Image (cartoon, rainbow, N blue to C red):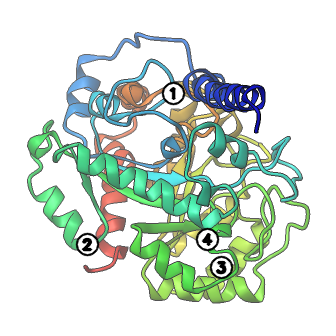
Amino acid sequence: MSRRSRKIFGFGIFSVVLAYALMRLFVAPMVDKSLNLQVPHRPYVISDAAAELHSGLRVMDWHTDTMLWDRDLLERSSYGHLDLPRMADGNIAVQMFTTVTKTPRGQNYDSNTGDSDNITSLAVVQGWPVRTWSSLLERALYQAERLDGFVTASEGKLVWIKSKGDLAAFTEGYTPSVWTGGARGVLLGSEGAHPLEGDLANIDRMFDAGYRMIGLTHFFDNDVAGSLHGTSKAGLSDFGRQVVAQLDAREIIIDLAHASEQAAWETLSITKRPVVVSHTGFKGACNSARNVSDDLMKAIADKGGLIAVGFWQGAVCGDTPDAIADAIEYGIGLVGADHVALGSDWDGTTHSITAEDLPAITDMLLQRGVPEEAIRKVMGENSLRFLGKWLPAT
């Protein structure tokens, strides 16, 4: 190679490295900021009664996609919806972190195929390992590794909850308004079962990585079931029935968020355990294509399941604490206070209040005359009771 050729080659390499560095520094945060928008409202005015009640709650939320984004979970961010400081501000005791591994271009609530994928380019721009660029399973495992890394680096401020024993040990130190050592519990769930890549053995790999909740579908049909937002609206496949049975056997919670109604009804008919809808709204309160029928919600509750109310327009026909409280109050009337929970969908490309704004929901529920006991249940006690019964023993 001539000297001139070497210079051209070297300049080319330098240009590629520089372009990649600029993408990491500027493009990735810009995408995050543009998709995970905050409702411009602060500060909310919280009554003294609501502030006192909220400070003594054991709050749990069932759905945040924060691991998808290139942010430090341990540091306060000015954008997005959740991090450890904002968890503390909102008095969140336990948070389910959910992982996204594939989304279609032009994503919508009505009809999507799995022929395209937004996450590949995001993985490249954010510097994920090459193994994640072509494998949905590896994307799920990598996000599990990220969460584990934050838990380790937190020096006890974040604590894994993978079993009944973990939960019992974590909650044992609880006193009103303070979790021992300021710790917050974390769980891990998958938004859809497509990371299994058609192999039942990958349920074990995901379990070993920390997954304790797995959804059946996301925004497109997969080899497990039809999506609520897919083209077929189909039920469970033969492989999907095997997946449901294996999730039961491994004591992994099944999440019916995004599943077609047929798939959800079929799952209820064969699972031996109650299920969760990790982020949703109620059709009777918000007639959105994102929400399933009230009859299905009642059937989920009748089986002992939980319905976690989301915080965004498509779920509750609004993005304010008032709209969220409307949905919660409707849900209590429909299925009872024992079966309603929180499922924000923070950092899930939504326009939402943030983790630090949770006291405003408590305030709105109090203003509506919802009994304090019901508020405690919805804000976290239902979720902790459910986990205490349905997580693996060890």
Q: Residue at x 80, y 59 (%)?
A: 220
Measure the C-alpha gap from mark 3 to mark 4: 11 Å
Q: Nearer the viewer, residue 137 or 324?
A: 137
Quarter holding residue 92: top left
- Element at label 3: helix
Measure the C-alpha gap from mark 2 to mark 1: 31 Å
Q: Nearer the viewer, mark 1 or mark 3?
A: 1
Q: Amino acid at mark 1?
A: Gly
In the drawing, does residue 372 fall left or right of residue 266? Answer: left
In the drawing, does residue 58 fall left or right of residue 11? Answer: left
The numbered disc on residue 56 is none
Q: Nearer the viewer, mark 1 or mark 4?
A: 1
Quarter holding residue 218: bottom right
Q: Quarter of the image containing the N terminus?
A: top right
Q: Amino acid at mark 4?
A: Ala
Disc nearer the start of the sequence (4/2): 2
Identify the residue position indicated by label 3 in the image.
267
Measure the C-alpha gap from mark 2 to mark 3: 24 Å
Quarter holding residue 392: bottom left
Disc nearer the start of the sequence (2/3): 2
Q: Amino acid at mark 2?
A: Lys
The x and y percentages for residue 314 are: 71, 38
Measure the C-alpha gap from mark 1 to mark 3: 34 Å
Identify the residue position indicated by label 4 in the image.
299
The numbered disc on residue 80 is 1
155 w.r.t. 125: above or below: below
127 w.r.t. 54: above or below: below
Identify the residue position indicated by label 2 in the image.
164
Q: Nearer the viewer, mark 2 or mark 1?
A: 1
